[in-house]
Amino acid sequence: MGVEATDGRSESVASPVEHLRAAALELTAESVVLTDASGRITYANHAFKKLHAMRRTAGVPHRSSELAADPDSADRYGELEAARARGQAWSGIVADTRRDGTRVELHLTTAPVRDRAGAVLGWIEIGRDVGLEHALETSLRHAAKMLVADRLASVVAHDLNNLLTAISGFTRLHRESHRDGGEDLGDLDEILHATDRGASLVRRVLAFSRRSGVRTVPMDVPLAVREAEPLVRRLLGEGIEFRLELEDVPLVLGDPDRIEEILLNLAANSRDAMPDGGTFVVRVSSAAHAGSAGRRGGSRSRRYVVLTVSDSGAGMDDATRARIFDPFFTTKELGKGTGLGLASVWSIVREAGGFIEVESALGMGTTFSIFLPAAVASAEDGEPRAGRSRRRGARRGYGSTARADAPASRPSRAPFAQLGYGDQVTALVVSLLVPEPSDEDAG
């Protein structure tokens, strides 16, 4: 493989075609280097300088060997030089150290340029940065592993949920049957509390795996923050001061478990940004804001509950702040971060109809302001949106059938046994009436 040289032009002034060729070489995204037969560089385009972190006006090295090769690529460069000694083309992945000290991975192809008699006149080297491709491949492999873990977690969560339902149901039956006996039922209450917490964990796993709808209930955000406080404090550790500043705010429609997930993800990032200690503050307030509705073209102000999380950590520059919600983006060392924490926060807030504002500067800490729509249509309208939906929407029913011999259904079957039906109950049909979404909700 090689390139045959054409007859050169004797004119001192290049033709328009030659100008176009030169411009094309300068504008191409791949690094292009031309050398003479001895390997001395006679031309290098702008992409070559950019790839090796050189200033545009900087001179190029006399030979490719003067570039700082990564030690791991010594064998590959040995193969390249051996191929050149034989007058053969070569292609492979190599790594160099740029002028700024960073590492770059290249797919390098080199081929000889021959005259019509077959003698080597020089060499062409074309290099392409493949670092981003390798990063994407790593991310895809990680995503595939996450998918397997997601499916396994979903199966385990469903089975665990059935066991917790049986434990909770039998405990409630036992408590009701002994309520008038004067016994201390505190132990049963502790069992119920533990099963409720277990069910909460199961709901979070199923919601994360997208195999269960997230609960949407009128939610007291300050209360949800209080319930998440012990876990957040434990995650932050003793070296970080944790402060709460909670105001009375309207309810929001959402899942309290997701508030805990948001706080834990943000607390993990803040902890890593404050290795020597600092301050972590969670505030809950309310505000009227044009928000996403205003950005869609409306000027009507809407009421939001604002969950503000700030720290006194290292902060971020503008380039990092612009990418923090990108999936798999992380500034942490390899193996210490998945890049999914803030992406998960963004997804939760978006599903709730809210938005996030971020303020940060290097050395000045970071503040996340999470705006969650209050269960009130706007700042001028005090009627809960959920109430209007129930009044306007027609009701429709959903049914669910459960085997009566399943452990989770036995507590529900017990009252029928007390009425004398015994084993005649073979299935339970559960019907639930919910409001039909109104046109406003559908929009």
Image: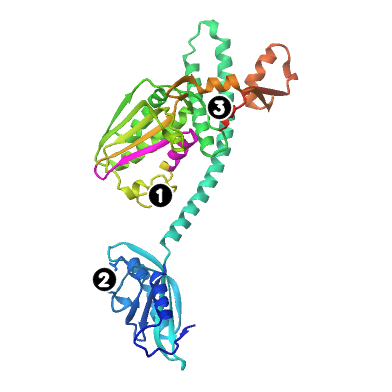
Taking the image as shown, residue 198 lies to the left or right of residue 224, namely right
- Apparent side of residue 349 relative to residue 285 in the rendered image (left or right): right
Q: What number is the disc on residue 58?
A: 2
Q: Is residue 343 above or below residue 59?
A: above
Residue 306 magenta: no
Q: Which residues are magenta?
A: 343-363
Q: Which mark is residue 227?
A: none
Determine the secondary structure under disc 1.
loop
Q: Is residue 294 above or below residue 59?
A: above
Residue 354 visible in this rendered orientation of the protein? no
The amino acid type of the residue labelled 1 equals Phe
Tag of residue 164: 3
Check if mark 2's residue and mark 1's residue have beta carbons within 8 Å: no
Residue denoted by label 1: 329
Q: Position of residue 113 (x, y in %)?
A: 43, 85
Of tags 1 and 3, the one toward the viewer is 1
Q: Secondary structure at mark 2?
A: loop
Mark with earlier residue (2, 1): 2
Q: Nearer the viewer, residue 237 or 361?
A: 361
Coordinates of residue 206 in the picture (x, y in percent): 54, 35
Residue type for callout 3: Leu
Q: Is residue 349 magenta?
A: yes
